[in-house]
Each structure stands twice: as C-alpha cells, then as structure tokens.
Image (cartoon, grey):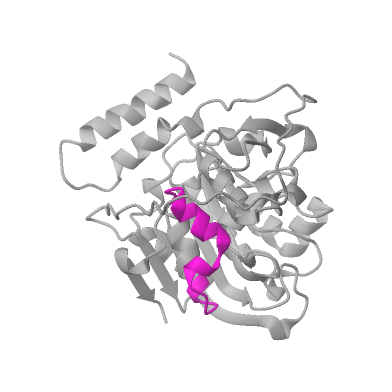
C-alpha cells in the first residue's frame, strides 16, 4: 500500500469509527471530507510555458449571481468562530484554536502543512502591522507539529527580496524556533492550474506546494488596503499566485474564484496590531492600533466578516466577501454563527 493510500485509509477508518458515537475529541467527518476533497487531488496543470489566455471585456459589468449564503450547519460541540482577546499572541492563538476543538481537528499525524502569513514586504518590522505577528505564526507552527504534522512549511511571495522580508518581519526566527521551515517560493514551482468553479478567473499560476499540502492554514494580519479596503484572509491568498497585478481587475470576483481552488482549512486572523490606514505597507506607527485580538474559524467568509467589523465596516462593503457569499464559500451574517468570545485579560 502506498503512503498516500495508507493515509487516506487511516482517515477513512477514523471517520468510520467516529460515526459510531456522537461526540469525540476530533471532528472526523471534517478530516474525511478534507482528505477526499477534489482540492487535495493532484491539480490539473498545463505544461510550463504553455499559453492559456483568458479574454475579458474590460468594459463589461461583472456578472451578478444570486446570493448563496449557506445555512449554518454547526458542530454542536464547537463554535463556528472564536475571538480571543487580551493575552500574549501565543496564548490567544492556543485559546482560540482550542475552543474550535484543537489543532488536532484540522491536522492529523503525517500531514504536510502550509502556513500562509502575510509577509508582503521587507520594509518594516512587525510593529508597523504590515506583516503577520511572528509569535502568532510561531504558535501555529508549534501546534501543527504537536498534532503530528510531518512537516510545516511557512511561505509568502513578497513584492521583492523574500529572504530579507522573512528576516525583517521576525517570522523566520519564530518559525525556526518552533521547528518549522521557511520556504522561499521558487518561480518555477508556480504551475498553471485550472479553477473549475471560477466565474471570471478560470486558471492561474498557483504555487504547487500549496496545492499539494494536506492542510492550508491561512494567517493574515488585519490591515487597511487602499484598493480592497482591507487585507484579510481571502486577500492573503494573492500570495500563492504568480501574477498578482492581473487580480486587480475585478478583484472581488477573482479573489472569490481563487478561494474556490485554494481552500483554507483553518483561518487565524492576526489582529494583535492592526494597520488602520495607509496599507498595505504602512510605515507610520500612528496608523497602528494595538487590539490584542485573534479570530479563528474554518470559515474564511466568517473570519473576514468578523474582522471587517473591527475596522467599522459591514462585511458586504468588501467586494470579495460579497462575491464569496454569492459563490457559497461561507457565512457573512454573524448573527447566524455560533461565536465564542474569550477574554484572557
């Protein structure tokens, strides 16, 4: 039996045993659905150098789709979204993920995990809130390894100079302390990949390691963005594709399209320090608000919707949330969610 088939067999066996009782430490159904998801099958790719041109009429209005916000189907044991406040970064991450059922609900022994923080530039250290808090990322790496991950890789595709960006952000040091691996994203590993459910964007060059990971943990920082209003979890996925400028035409729809192909198994929003203005790169400490908050959810729409309220926005004001709801990617109506708030202060 191959390693892959053995792992899937163990997942299936665990899920089957889990169906014999109503409660347990791990949500086995979610693990089974994750392991058998089409997103985890070898991606449809094209040969390097091949052309796959998408012609878009720049004058055409984006096609509208009926709202498809799903009804909440909560796990009765766990909340849909957790907000932890007023603790040190690692304590808040552990409290939030623990309330969701623990990292073992998302990562099982032998998994290859990719952690995707926001390390967009090398301009400033984490105090300026343009990059994800390094202790948040370090905590995520530790918890994934504690849950039995075979390997935890942390990566982003900065504007320039990834090695410097990794160092300046402070993330590299914390990841290495935690036992994870910082990966510089090689240009040759971006593969042309079909996006079958995309409405506007039908393919993109996506980083192969992200596509092949067993688990993707999306760890954005909550910050202002002059074009998108806010950079949160859906916007953070732009760091897994090669041609980012292309995304800015019909940005909301294309972020939603990308989110149908690159699925975040867990979202942990870093709102320890929030960049309130002049994003995405900032540069003025006067624009930074120390909020000491962590948001965690397996629902990317829910996590982004809650984070939007920290800036005074309604979720529907963000184009990518609106389009994501229309495509059935999650729930923006916070009143429909089981939300748990934890104050560690």
The spot of residue 18 in percent (x, y) is 22, 37
The vertical placement of 139 against 41, above or below, is below
Q: Residue at x 38, y 47 (%)?
A: 104
**Residue 16 at x, y percent in the picture:** 24, 30
Question: In terms of image quadrants, where is residue 184?
Answer: top right
Answer with the quarter of the image where residue 46 lies: top right
User: How many numbered circles does the render carry?
Assistant: 0
Is residue 323 inside the magenta stretch? yes
Which of the image's four quarters has the N terminus? top left
> Picture coordinates of residue 44 (x, y %)?
59, 25
Nearest the viewer among 163 and 196 is: 196
Looking at the rendering, the stretch of residues picked out in magenta corresponds to 308-329
Residue 275: x %, y % from top left: 65, 75
Residue at 56% across, 49% down = 63
Q: Nearer the viewer, residue 144 or 200?
A: 200
The answer to whether residue 128 is left or right of residue 263 is right
């Amino acid at each position: 039996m191959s390693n892959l088939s053995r792992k899937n067999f163990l997942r299936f066996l665990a899920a089957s045993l889990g169906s014999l009782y109503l409660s347990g430490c791990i949500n086995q159904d979610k693990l089974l659905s994750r392991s058998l998801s089409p997103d985890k099958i070898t991606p449809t790719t094209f040969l390097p150098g091949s052309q796959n041109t998408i012609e878009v009429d720049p004058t055409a209005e984006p096609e509208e789709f009926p709202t498809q916000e799903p009804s909440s189907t909560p796990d009765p044991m766990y909340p849909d979204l957790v907000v932890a406040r007023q603790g040190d970064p690692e304590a808040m991450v552990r409290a939030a993920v623990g309330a969701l059922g623990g990292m073992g609900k998302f990562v099982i022994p032998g998994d290859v995990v990719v952690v995707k923080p926001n390390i967009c530039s090398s301009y400033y250290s984490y105090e300026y809130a343009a990059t994800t808090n390094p202790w948040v990322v370090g905590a995520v790496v530790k918890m994934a390894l504690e849950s039995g991950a075979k390997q935890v890789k942390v990566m982003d595709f900065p504007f320039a100079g990834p090695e410097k960006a990794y160092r300046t952000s402070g993330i590299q040091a914390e990841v290495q302390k935690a036992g994870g691996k910082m990966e510089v994203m090689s240009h040759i590993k971006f593969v042309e990949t079909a996006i079958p459910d995309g409405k506007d964007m039908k393919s993109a060059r996506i980083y192969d390691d992200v596509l092949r990971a067993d688990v993707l943990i999306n760890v954005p920082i909550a910050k202002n963005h002059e074009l998108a209003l806010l950079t949160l979890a859906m916007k953070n996925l732009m760091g897994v594709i090669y041609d980012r400028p292309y995304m800015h035409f019909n940005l909301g729809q294309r972020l939603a399209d990308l989110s149908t192909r690159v699925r975040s198994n867990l979202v942990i929003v870093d709102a320890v320090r929030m960049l309130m203005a002049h994003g995405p790169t900032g540069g003025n400490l006067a624009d930074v608000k120390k909020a000491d908050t962590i948001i965690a959810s397996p629902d990317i729409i829910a996590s982004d919707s809650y984070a939007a309220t920290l800036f005074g926005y309604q979720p529907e004001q963000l184009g990518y949330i609106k389009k994501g709801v229309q495509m059935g990617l999650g729930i923006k109506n916070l009143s429909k969610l089981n939300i748990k708030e934890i104050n560690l202060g």
